[in-house]
Image (cartoon, grey):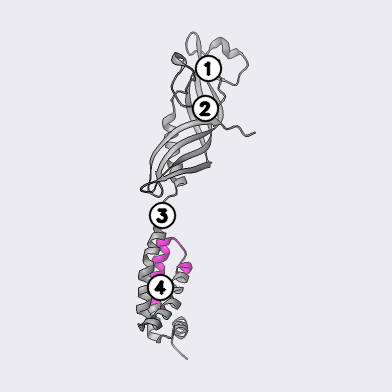
Amino acid sequence: MSNKNPKAKRLADAYRLRYAEALNVMREDSDLAEELAEELEISRAEATRRIEEQYAAARQRADERGVSFRTALAEIRSEQSLNIQFEALAKAAPSVEEMLREEIPALCQRLTGEMIEVPGEDDLYVPGLKFSEVELPRDVVDEISIHNIDLDLDTLVWNRADVYEGDTHVGTAEVRAQVTLDGFMFKHDTYGEHDVEVWIFDWNDQMSYVGFVREVVLEFEVTVRPGMAIDNIEFSAATDGVRR
C-alpha cells in the first residue's frame, strides 16, 4: 500500500511534477489559502480554488520558458499579487452610500434648532433652511424650526453629477425623512382647525409652543472622494415627501 498523499499524487500526475515537488507546493499553498481567505474575507475553499486555478498557467509557462513549475508559479503569483491587494482594498473601502449613511445623520443632528426660511422680499424675508416646496402652516405658526429628523436611510440615493481631478466626485444625495417642526402660535389660533399639536399652551401671555410633522425628501450637496472621505456635505432643500 502506498504511503503517498493522494492529493499530492494527483497534483504530480496532473502537472507532470515529481511527488516531492507536488507535496511542497501543497504545503505552501495550504498556508497561502489561509492568508488569502483572511485578507479577502472569503471562505478557505474559495481561496484554495483561486490558488489552484494558477497551476495550469504555471505548467504552461514552465514548458514555454524552460523553468521549473515552482519558479513559474512564483512569477505568476507575484504578477497577480497587486490585483489581490487591489481587490482587498476595494473590499475594505466603504462605498459612497456607506459613507453618506454615516455623515447624513450627523449633519441632521446639527440641523436641530435651525430656523426654516420664510420666503419674501426685503424685510419680509427670513433666512433659514429651504422648505419652500413643503406645505407649512406659515399663516398661523411663527418661527418654525427643526425639532427632530427621523431618517429612512433605506431610501438613500446618491446621484453623481461630475468628476474632477483627483477622483473628486460632486453630486447630490436624497433621503426620505419624517421631520418634526416646532414654532409659536397665538393662543386664540390653537382653537381653529389645523394639524398643529399644542405642546405648551401657556408659553407666555399670548403664545403657545406647538409642533407638527411633515413627510419630506431631504436633499444634500456632496463632494466626495470614493473609498476615502466625504470632503463636504451641505443641506440643500426639502421637498414634499408624501407618497401619493
Alpha carbon distance from label 3 to label 1: 49 Å
Q: How far apart are marks 4 and 1 (CA)?
A: 71 Å
Secondary structure under tag 3 reads helix
Mark 4: few, some, or many residues within 10 Å (few <14, many ≥20)? some
Mark 3 vs 4, N-terminal side = 4
**Structural distance between the alpha carbons of marks 4 and 2:** 58 Å
Tag 4 near tag 1, CB within 8 Å: no
The mark closer to the camera, 3 or 4, is 3
Q: Find numbered disc 4 in the image and state the secondary structure of the residue it sits on.
A: helix
**C-alpha span from label 3 to label 4:** 24 Å
Q: Report the residue at 37% width, 83% height from top.
A: 21
Q: Does the magenta stretch include residue 86?
A: no
Q: Give whichever of discs 2 and 3 has the lower sequence position.
A: 3
Where does residue 61 sit, x and y in percent of width and height? 40, 79
Q: Is residue 167 above or below residue 18?
A: above
Can you tell which of label 4 and label 1 is closer to the viewer?
A: 1
Q: Name the residue under label 3.
A: 92
Under circle 1, the secondary element is loop
Q: Magenta segment range?
A: 26-47
Mark 2: which amino acid?
Thr
Determine which residue is flagged by label 4.
Answer: 30
Residue 228's place in the image compared with 25, above or below, is above
Nearer to us of marks 2 and 3 is: 3
- Give the mark nearer the N terminus: 2 vs 1: 1
What percent of the width, then of the height, locates residue 51? 43, 71
Q: Mark 1 points at which residue?
A: 141
